[in-house]
Amino acid sequence: MTNQTSPQFAVAYTAPGQNANNAPTLNVLGMPTAVKMTHSQTYGQFSCVETSLAPLQMGPPPHVHHELDEIMYVIEGTITLLEGDQVREVSAGGYHFRPRGVVHTFWNGHDAPARFLDMYPSSQDFAHYLEELAELGGAIHAEGGNPFAPENMARFKALDARYNHEVFYEQMPEHMAKYGPKE
């Protein structure tokens, strides 16, 4: 058997310890996120990121994707997920599938670091959304702006709308009070 590649497609490879196309690691809402496989590398079929959460670190606000499914694989530690109104813990070696249309979020509710892969088997370029989100957050920070000011929330919501998902920013204080670290 020979190893032949169709002329219209090429194999994509990201070396261990590297990011796709040697891109820098992103700061997505305070979470180090590395794009490991880009949408363009897979001809618009898939993208994958690796995200780290410090001990007791909250993830994103509750949100819902209308056109995107997600598969999480936990590499290290334990990730706690809220899926609808159910809370589930996924420890290292575990997988979690989040279908489109389900409100969800995640966080590290433990005293040890956690790391996971999020895989997006979709024609939607969600890794690019994360790049844009990191860029927008960085710009607001550089401007000295309050990310929760109405004008900046409008910027975040416009970005979310372009990727056909909703982020329930207003639920974050209640979510943190219920699930966040207790002092």
Image (spheres, grey):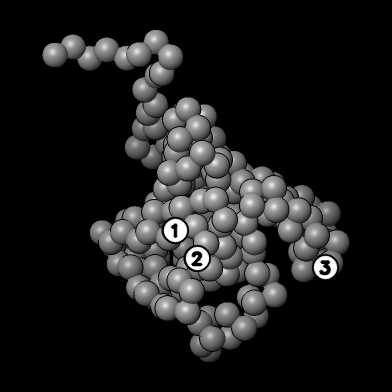
Which residue is the site of mark 2?
Answer: 102
For disc 2, the neighbor class at 10 Å (few under 14, some 14 to 19, many from 20) is some
Callouts 3 and 1 close, C-beta under 8 Å: no
Please state if 25 lies on the left or on the right of 114 as rendered.
right
x, y (%) of residue 83? Answer: 45, 71
Which residue is the site of mark 1?
Answer: 99
Label 2, secondary structure: give it.
loop
Please state if 45 lies on the left or on the right of 26 as rendered.
left
Label 3, secondary structure: give it.
loop
Real-space Cα distance between discs 3 and 1?
A: 31 Å
Callouts 2 and 1 close, C-beta under 8 Å: yes
x, y (%) of residue 68? Answer: 51, 51
Q: Closer to the N terminus: mark 3 or mark 1? A: 1
Which residue is the site of mark 3?
Answer: 149
Three-letter amino acid code at the position of disc 3: Ala
Q: Nearer the viewer, mark 3 or mark 1?
A: 1
